[in-house]
């Protein structure tokens, strides 16, 4: 029997047909949503980044050993998208949405403040992977920052687009879990547009979202 191929994937949100049945060496964190996406893509097995392990060991929650065989369907994953604060047209306040993965971003998220469970690193260093929409602001997970600060590389790219962006400390909230970031997360780094608005390191995600909504 032929051995499965070994393939490199910068992100499990971008798997292609050739990845089906392969052993993936993935740039994604080892959280539950990443494992689900790898299983849904038909991976034979996967090696992830431990993302500093982090809060509740979320960076190594990988559960492919419990996933069906590639010819089956993976267990269902919750939608992974939810409104945290509604838009207020009268007050000119954007909506705040939580997304467990950057793979959950939709065109309709433009203009919103996005709390995203993915790490704050570019996929393979590609600036186009920073964020597919023009959001009012975005907060990612710092994944323990990683080698050479790799998990912060979205921030300067989004700064170049004039977009405030920050990351949540990996010890304060689970990676791949926007609700955890919202409930217990605190900010470990901001980019220049956010700092110019007076956003500071150490504040809670909820407070940061409130300040970003008001334009402070």
Image (cartoon, grey):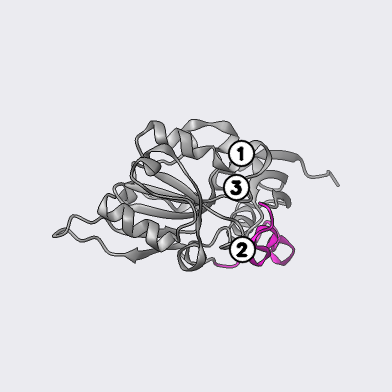
Q: Nearer the viewer, mark 1 or mark 3?
A: 1
Assess whether residue 67 is covered by the magenta stretch: yes
Chain-order first, disc 2 or disc 1: 2
Which of the 4 image quadrants contains residue 134?
A: top left
User: Which residue does the image show at 29% across and 58% down from the upper left?
Assistant: 95
Q: Are marks 1 and 3 in contact (CB under 8 Å)?
A: no
Residue position marked by numbered label 1 in the rendering? 150
Q: Residue 130: give x, y in percent of width and height.
A: 47, 38
Q: Residue 211: give x, y in percent of width and height.
A: 32, 55
Disc number for residue 74? 2
**Residue 47 in view in this figure:** yes
**Residue 10 in view in this figure:** no
User: Which residue does the image show at 55% across and 47% down from the upper left?
Assistant: 13
State the extent of the magenta-drawn residues as a range: 51-76
81 or 195, which is in the foreground? 195
Q: Residues within 10 Å of mark 1 (few under 14, many from 20)?
A: some
Q: Residues within 10 Å of mark 2 (few under 14, many from 20)?
A: many
Q: Are marks 2 and 3 in contact (CB under 8 Å)?
A: no
Residues at marks 1 and 3, CA–CA distance in whole angstroms: 17 Å
User: Which residue does the image show at 55% across and 67% down from the upper left?
Assistant: 76
Residue position marked by numbered label 3 in the rendering? 12
């Amino acid at each position: 029997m032929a051995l499965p191929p070994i393939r490199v994937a910068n992100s499990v949100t971008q798997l292609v047909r050739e990845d089906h049945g392969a052993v993936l060496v993935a740039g994604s964190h080892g959280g539950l949503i990443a494992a689900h996406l790898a299983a849904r893509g038909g991976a034979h097995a996967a090696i992830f980044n431990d993302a500093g392990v982090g809060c509740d060991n979320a960076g190594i929650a990988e559960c492919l050993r419990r996933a069906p065989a590639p010819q089956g369907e993976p267990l269902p994953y919750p939608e992974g998208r939810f409104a945290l604060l509604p838009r207020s047209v009268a007050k000119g306040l954007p909506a705040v949405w939580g997304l467990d993965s950057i793979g959950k971003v939709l065109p309709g998220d433009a203009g919103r403040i996005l709390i995203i469970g993915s790490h704050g690193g570019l996929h393979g260093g590609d600036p186009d992977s920073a964020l597919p929409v023009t959001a009012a602001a975005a907060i990612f997970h710092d994944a323990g920052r990683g080698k050479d600060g790799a998990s912060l590389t979205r921030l300067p790219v989004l700064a170049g687009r004039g977009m405030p962006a920050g990351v949540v400390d990996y010890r304060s909230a689970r990676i791949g879990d926007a609700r955890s970031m919202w409930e217990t997360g605190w900010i470990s780094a901001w980019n220049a547009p956010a700092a110019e608005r007076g956003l500071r390191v150490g504040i809670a995600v909820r407070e940061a979202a409130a300040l970003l909504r008001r334009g402070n």
